[in-house]
Each structure stands twice: as structure tokens, then as C-alpha cells.
């Protein structure tokens, strides 16, 4: 297949009846489209390999009298992207559904239906996704004219889980309260003996109104909020948010800051991958690997605190550049410390994975085939473990990744072992990238002032964080006010894949499968 | 008669008071082996004290079975300690053999499995079904392995076996002895909920066996359950120590030999605990469906050890 170009996407937009076509940046072409033309556009783009990767709504009724949908189409590599800005009539509050064309779209549409009260026509799944049963009918919190409610009465409506019936089928309900310190999520297993025949996850227990809060929080505090979308992805979310703001304001980030952002993102990837490998081997009962991985993770967090001023790298990525101790960090020293810790980690990982009993538990467990992964449009490291060769750092580079040669780890087997190996390879690669950045980061300023935002304009920031691509879509309302911020954590895209990966596995292997995905609840339940 | 009463009391005291220390030492050793400082070996006593003072929350859906089970567990384990030759080869119940011991274990398992079901939670039932499956596979091996010794000692009483082997150490110089030891060791791992069958340290409800059944217990009930679990570990390790290596177990009940016997037991238990901690550090947990294979293997070892008695005179 010939490489898809921006011109191909522009052509498809024109043919679907779009107007106001403009090239936003090197990767993105955008155009305005009537709602009715959306399925036609999807059908034109599908043969080119571009599918719905992002779909969000904004309440723009007070400006243009209608709602705006932003729908991004792209191949898994997220380059090139076509962004369709779709007008949805405020009175009808309906738009044609893409659910039968794209699994990702089906989930975005359910979220939009819950939060905005816009109906995706022809959507096969009428159930709620983001809002829980006790939220009253007709209450759509992301509409701008909504009266926010503090308290709800439980309407006593149970969630309509899919029921499996038959002889010897039992249901096991797990969560939302767990025995360990885990975020809340409900898992409904249907089992035949110990074998899982169906799993449904019900999330949303930590819905915090994050996206709404962006609209009301003082603008200078919003980067802090972005860092807290998912505690383990502070740098990733902050960077995606800042990139969106910088694109909006037309702000050029100084070269030194672009390189330091690479360092921050790789530090985050490293400490998370180390912790994950520890958790995975711990779930096989191999506590030795866990104890040492967490010792190394602790050393990495202390290193983070020394170079960036915060163990979880908060406050380092800011609009217009980077801030705090990282600006003047001794990168050579940092790279050496990282290399030493990574070498230790590799030794522990080798000791763990050379253990045949550990290996036996990992291999073949929780297999997500490439076909299922592609159908469910799985992203990030879970996708790479199932043979989807996509990584924004290489394919649609941001920060200073364009000047680096990022080696992407891809495995074909899609089991817990493959997801562990992707983490190992990426941890090694993170250390290499930090060393490379240490040698090439120029001296100079690390931050410029963010110009005022052009009112009514919108922009994306897409960052390959450690779990996968993080999207932030920002619509400005005034020079320093926001109308809408839509966040997509890779967890939102990958949660459904877990339900398929565990099929035909046994119940006691579920925690291992779950840990190998390690998806964020907080990043999903915005 | 008075000697028997004193002996029984002494055994129960050693077992009941020492069992938490054994569990604590095992935990501390495991922590040290993986490079952690770990809790003090005395930690289980502090835990028991804490639990005994806490309020016991009991689900309203449970029946008397749930409340009686902790006492049944402790009672059966105390009797088991009295039956097993701990400080002397002679026990307070000289007629007691492996069959009685087996039934004591089964009685506890039976009640615990019922209690797991009684609370009505998904995890309790899961734990019960797994526990019963493991018990059904493990218990024949316990009996068979001890029979291999009983056949050579010409008695099924535990005290008799210890006495005979202590008197004639050459009897143990038989491949059957080693095979029986291996079989019994594996089955000990399953019965006491150790790796690779069960993971006593896990917080993951879905992978638990023993812990899943006791998830609903709290306060003094949990203290009793934990105490009984520690005693079960003590009984199994003592059986391994005194049945298979009966040297140093006195056959007369007098203060000095009994104290020496206690020292010998402490030494043997220390060796076994270090071995167990080392083993648990280098292995991972088996996939649940592989556990029957392991237990079938241990049964085969036990069967071979009985066969060896007849083949190797």
C-alpha cells in the first residue's frame, strides 16, 4: 500500500463535501463538514487505512448556535491525520453514528451521549458509559448552560450487564472495592468452573469532572490539572496539554526545552515500566523480582526529584517550555545514573524471566490476537505487544523526537509475556534516548511566554506517553479562558481489549492479565 | 496418667505458643532473601494481639457455622499437636496414628470450606471449591507417605514410628524413606497454603485459595484462623522433622531429655524453615490447573515409596 499522504486526506475531505480545508501542521489537515456527511467521509477514509481515532464534542451554541464535533481520522501510526469539524444542530441534538464502522468511535459516541446529550443515530449500544446509573436522565454536565448538581439520589437502576446463561455458568462480581490499594473498577465475570467465558468492566467510579474543571479553573493553574489526570502520566498529560496550547497560540518552544521534554517523558516511561515488570512478576508469586523492581523504581523516583524537583515529574512541563530544576539539570550525570539503574533492572528482569515457572505463567496467558487488537483499535504498548507497529515518537514526532531515531519494540504474540517484553525493550530504549538527549541538548533559554489564545480556535496535542498516545483537544474561549478540553488517555481506548484478552483464561490468571495491561482508572474516568 | 497430662499440656504449650514464631521467622527469612528488611519474627504475636482486641464484624447472612469454624480450627490443631510427637516419641494419646491426624486436618478443612460458602461472597465460594479440590488430591498422599514409614516400623502410631526409627536408624537407609519425604514435603506445601500452590502474601482475591475462604473474618475470629494456620504449619513441619529425622527425640518423658528433645526439634525446624524460605524465594506460583499435576506427582512418589518397602528389604 502506498504511503498515505496529507493530500490524500485533503482529497477525501473535499469529496465528502468539506469546506474551509486547511493544513494545521505537518501531520494534520482539517475541514468543516455537515453532520450528515460524516459517514461518507469515514467510508472514503477507511480504504485508505485512516479510521476514527478521536471524537469529541464542544458546546458552541452561544457562538454559532450549534454543537461542534471534532473527529480525527488517522492510521494507527497517527500520521497523517484528517480532522473533521462537524456542526450538530442544537435543536435536533443528533448526529449519524460511526459505531458500526469504528469501535473507538462507538465508545466516544456513548461518552458524548452521556455528557452532552447528543444522540448518535444508529448506535447499537444504548447503555451509558461515562455516567453512572444514579445520574438523573437528561442531566448532561458538559453542556455550558447546565446547573451543576452536588448531590444525587440513587435511582436504583442496575446497570444492564450482558448475561450469560447455561448450565454451570456462574457470575463472579469483583470490585469496585478491592482487597489491595487499587483504583475502583467493577468486573463482572461469567465463568464455567474457573474458565472465563465473558467479562464486562464497568468503570467511571472516579469520575471527577476533570474536563469541566478546565473551563472554570484559573488558566495558569490548568497545567497542574493536566498533570493530575492520571498520577503516573504527569509528564505525558502535561506535555500533550501544553503542546495543544502552544499550537493554539502559535508559540515556538526553545530547542533546549524540546530536548528536555524528551528527557522528562522518557524518565516517566522508565519508572513506570520498571514498576510494571515488578508487579507482573509479583502476580506470578515471584516476590523477589517485585522487591527489586520496586527498589529500582524508588531510586528512579528519587532521581526524578533531584533533576526535576518532583518524584512524579510534576511541575516540569509548562506552557512555552519547561520549568524548575530540570532547566539547568546536569544531563550527562543524569544519563549515567539512569544507565546504571537500567542495567540493574535488566539483571533483575533477566533473573525473573529466566525462571521457567515465571515464564510458564506469562507465556500464552491473556492473549490478544493482532486481529482483535486491530478491530478494537488498541493503541500504545498493548497494541505493540499484539503486532501493531505504531509509536508517535517515531511516526508523528513531537518535542525533539524527530531528531532522534526511536527504535520501536513490537512483539507478535500478544500475551502477558509480549507486554512484559515491550516494557523491557522500551525501558532500555528510554535509557538510550536519555543518553542521546544528554549529548545533543543545546544551551539556551528553556521557556518563552505563551501568547494569548485566539478566541474560538481549537488545537490538538498528541504525545506518546508510556501507556500510549495521549490526546488533548483544546478549544479557546478567550485569550486566557478555555471553552472545552477533551482528554483521551490510552486507557480509555484499551480497557475493552482486556475483556477479550482474558477469554478462555482461568479466573486466577485475571490479575496477571490485568496487570500486564495496567490501565489507568483515573485517566479513563474523567 | 499424670505424666500424660503434663506431656499433653507441654506439647500444646510448645506448639500453640511457638507456631506464630515459626510463621514469623519464615516471613522474616523470605524478606531477607529478597533483599528487604521485613517485619520482625515476633510480628505475628503483635498481629494476633491487635486482632484479638478489634471488633469482629460478622455478616448478617452467615449462620452459626461461620462463627464456630475458628474455634473448630484451633481445637483440631491443638489436638493435632498433642497427637504428634513434638518433644518426645511417646505422646499423650499413644494409640493415635496418622489416620486420626488426617481426620483432624479434614475436619478443619471441611469447616473452613463451609465457612467460605457461608458468607455468600463470590470469593469465599471460589476459595472453598479450590481448597476442597486441593485437599482431595493432597490427603491421600499424606496417608500413603506415612504408611511407607509405618510399614517398615510395623506400627501406624506416630510415636511408635518415631521410636522404631530412632532405635534402628538403618531402617531409614532405604530409597523409600527419601521418596516418602519428598512426597510429604510437596503435600505440606499444598496443605499449608505455600508456594507454588497458594500464595500466602497475595492481596489478589481472584488468585487466593486459603485466604479467599477467610476474607470475611475479622477481629478475634481472624486471630483464631491465623493462629490455627500457623499451628498447621507447625504440625506439618514437626511431622517432617520428627517422623523422617527422628534422631534426638527422647523416648522417656523426663525434664532433661525433653528439653534436649526440644532443642533438637528447634534445630530441625530451623533447617526446614530456611529450606522452605529459600524454596519460596526461587519459585513462582503454579497456574491453578497445574496444581493437580504437582499433587499427582507427589502421590506417585508416595506410591513408589510404599512399593520400595517391599522391593528393598
Image (cartoon, grey):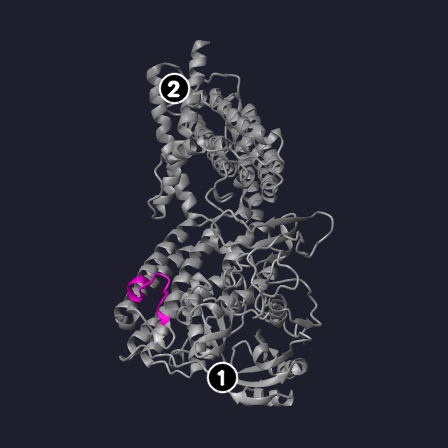
In percent of width and height, residue A247 lies at 44, 81
The chain identifier of the residue carrying mark 2 reads B
Q: At numbered mark 2, what does the secondary structure look like: helix, strand or loop?
A: loop
Q: Foreground residue, B295 or A27?
A: A27
Residue B72 forms part of the magenta stretch: no
Q: Is residue A3 above or below residue A477?
A: below
Q: Foreground residue, A526 or A105?
A: A526
Q: What whole-number distance in Å separates the C-alpha atoms at marks 2 and 1?
A: 85 Å
The chain identifier of the residue carrying mark 1 reads A
Give the residues drawn in magenta, as a range: A304-317
In percent of width and height, residue A420 lies at 47, 61
Q: Which residue is mark 1?
A: A27
> Residue sitting at 46 percent across and 72 percent down?
A464
Q: At numbered mark 1, what does the secondary structure look like: helix, strand or loop?
A: loop
Left or right: A107, with A212 as reference point: right
Q: Foreground residue, B193 or A333?
A: A333
Q: Is residue B96 above or below residue A292?
A: above
Question: For the residues carrying marks 2 and 1, which lies nearer the camera in this image?
Answer: 1
Left or right: A496, with A424 as reference point: right
Q: Which residue is mark 2?
A: B250
Q: Is residue A237 above or below residue B175?
A: below
In percent of width and height, residue B216 lies at 55, 38
In percent of width and height, residue A215 lies at 49, 70
Amino acid at each position: 500500500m502506498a504511503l498515505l499522504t496529507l493530500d490524500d486526506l485533503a482529497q477525501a475531505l473535499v469529496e465528502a463535501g468539506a469546506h474551509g480545508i486547511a493544513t494545521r501542521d505537518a501531520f494534520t489537515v482539517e475541514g468543516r463538514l455537515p453532520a450528515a456527511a460524516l459517514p461518507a467521509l469515514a467510508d472514503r477514509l477507511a480504504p485508505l487505512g485512516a479510521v476514527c481515532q478521536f471524537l469529541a464534542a464542544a458546546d458552541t451554541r452561544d457562538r454559532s448556535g450549534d454543537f461542534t464535533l471534532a473527529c480525527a481520522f488517522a492510521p494507527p501510526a497517527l500520521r497523517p491525520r484528517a480532522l473533521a469539524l462537524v456542526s450538530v444542530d442544537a435543536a435536533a441534538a443528533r448526529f449519524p453514528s460511526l459505531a458500526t464502522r469504528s469501535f473507538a468511535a462507538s465508545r466516544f459516541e456513548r461518552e458524548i451521549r452521556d455528557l452532552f446529550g447528543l444522540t448518535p443515530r444508529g448506535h447499537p449500544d444504548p447503555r451509558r458509559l461515562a455516567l453512572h446509573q444514579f445520574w438523573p436522565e437528561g442531566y448532561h454536565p458538559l453542556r455550558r448552560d447546565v446547573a451543576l448538581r452536588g448531590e444525587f439520589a440513587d435511582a436504583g437502576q442496575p446497570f444492564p450487564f450482558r448475561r450469560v446463561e447455561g448450565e454451570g455458568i456462574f457470575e463472579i462480581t469483583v470490585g469496585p472495592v478491592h482487597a489491595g490499594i487499587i483504583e475502583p473498577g467493577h468486573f463482572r465475570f461469567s465463568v464455567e468452573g474457573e474458565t472465563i467465558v465473558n467479562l464486562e468492566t464497568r468503570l467511571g467510579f472516579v469520575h471527577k469532572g476533570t474536563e469541566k474543571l478546565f473551563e472554570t479553573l484559573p488558566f495558569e493553574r490548568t497545567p497542574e490539572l493536566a498533570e493530575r489526570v492520571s498520577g503516573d502520566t504527569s509528564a505525558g498529560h502535561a506535555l500533550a496539554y501544553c503542546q495543544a496550547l502552544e499550537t493554539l497560540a502559535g508559540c515556538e518552544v526553545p530547542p533546549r526545552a524540546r530536548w528536555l521534554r524528551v528527557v522528562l517523558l522518557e524518565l516517566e516511561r522508565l519508572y513506570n515500566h520498571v514498576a510494571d515488570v515488578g508487579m507482573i512478576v509479583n502476580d506470578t508469586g515471584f516476590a523477589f523480582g517485585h522487591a527489586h523492581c520496586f527498589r529500582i523504581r524508588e531510586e528512579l523516583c528519587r532521581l526524578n526529584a533531584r533533576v526535576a524537583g518532583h518524584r512524579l515529574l510534576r511541575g516540569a512541563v509548562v506552557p512555552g517550555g519547561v520549568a524548575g530544576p530540570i532547566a539547568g539539570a546536569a544531563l550527562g550525570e543524569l544519563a549515567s545514573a539512569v544507565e546504571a539503574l537500567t542495567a540493574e533492572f535488566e539483571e533483575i528482569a533477566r533473573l525473573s524471566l529466566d525462571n521457567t515457572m515465571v515464564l510458564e505463567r506469562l507465556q500464552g496467558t491473556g492473549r490478544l490476537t493482532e486481529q482483535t487488537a486491530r478491530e478494537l483499535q488498541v493503541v500504545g504498548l498493548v497494541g505493540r505487544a499484539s503486532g501493531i507497529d505504531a509509536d508517535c515518537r517515531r511516526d508523528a514526532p513531537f518535542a525533539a523526537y524527530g531528531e532522534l531515531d526511536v527504535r520501536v519494540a513490537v512483539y507478535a504474540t500478544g500475551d502477558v509475556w509480549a507486554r512484559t517484553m515491550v516494557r523491557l525493550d522500551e525501558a532500555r530504549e528510554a535509557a538510550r534516548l536519555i543518553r542521546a538527549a544528554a549529548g545533543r541538548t543545546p544551551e539556551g533559554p528553556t521557556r518563552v511566554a505563551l501568547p494569548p489564545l485566539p478566541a474560538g480556535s481549537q488545537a490538538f496535542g498528541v504525545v506518546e506517553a508510556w501507556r500510549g498516545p495521549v490526546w488533548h483537544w483544546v478549544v479557546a474561549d478567550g485569550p486566557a479562558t478555555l471553552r472545552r478540553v477533551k482528554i483521551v488517555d490510552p486507557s480509555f481506548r484499551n480497557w475493552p481489549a482486556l475483556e477479550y484478552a482474558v477469554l478462555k483464561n482461568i479466573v486466577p490468571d485475571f490479575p496477571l492479565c490485568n496487570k500486564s495491561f495496567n490501565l489507568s482508572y483515573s485517566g479513563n474516568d474523567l | 496418667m499424670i505424666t500424660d497430662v503434663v506431656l499433653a499440656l507441654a506439647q500444646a504449650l510448645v506448639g500453640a505458643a511457638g507456631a506464630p514464631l515459626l510463621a514469623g521467622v519464615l516471613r522474616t527469612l523470605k524478606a531477607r532473601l529478597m533483599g528487604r528488611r521485613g517485619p520482625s519474627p515476633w510480628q505475628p504475636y503483635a498481629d494476633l494481639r491487635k486482632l484479638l482486641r478489634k471488633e469482629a464484624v460478622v455478616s448478617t447472612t452467615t449462620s452459626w457455622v461461620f462463627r464456630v469454624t475458628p474455634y473448630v480450627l484451633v481445637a483440631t490443631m491443638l489436638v493435632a499437636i498433642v497427637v504428634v510427637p513434638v518433644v518426645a516419641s511417646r505422646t499423650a494419646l499413644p494409640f493415635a496414628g496418622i489416620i486420626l491426624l488426617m481426620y483432624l486436618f479434614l475436619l478443619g478443612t471441611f469447616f473452613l470450606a463451609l465457612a467460605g460458602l457461608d458468607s455468600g461472597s463470590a470469593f469465599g465460594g471460589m476459595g472453598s471449591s479450590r481448597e476442597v479440590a486441593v485437599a482431595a488430591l493432597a490427603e491421600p498422599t499424606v496417608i500413603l507417605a506415612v504408611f511407607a514409614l509405618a510399614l517398615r516400623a510395623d506400627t501406624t502410631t506416630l510415636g511408635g514410628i518415631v521410636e522404631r526409627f530412632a532405635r534402628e536408624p538403618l531402617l531409614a537407609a532405604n530409597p523409600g524413606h527419601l521418596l516418602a519425604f519428598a512426597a510429604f514435603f510437596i503435600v505440606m506445601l499444598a496443605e499449608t497454603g505455600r508456594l507454588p500452590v497458594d500464595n500466602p502474601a497475595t492481596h489478589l482475591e481472584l488468585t487466593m485459595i486459603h485466604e479467599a475462604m477467610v476474607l470475611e473474618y475479622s477481629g478475634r475470629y481472624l486471630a483464631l484462623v491465623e493462629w490455627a494456620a500457623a499451628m498447621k504449619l507447625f504440625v506439618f513441619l514437626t511431622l517432617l522433622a520428627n517422623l523422617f529425622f527422628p534422631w534426638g527425640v527422647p523416648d522417656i518423658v523426663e525434664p532433661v531429655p525433653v528439653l534436649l528433645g526440644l532443642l533438637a526439634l528447634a534445630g530441625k525446624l530451623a533447617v526446614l524453615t530456611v529450606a522452605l524460605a529459600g524454596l519460596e524465594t526461587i519459585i513462582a506460583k503454579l497456574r491453578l490447573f497445574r496444581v493437580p499435576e504437582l499433587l499427582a506427582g507427589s502421590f506417585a512418589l508416595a506410591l513408589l515409596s510404599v512399593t520400595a518397602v517391599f522391593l528393598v528389604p
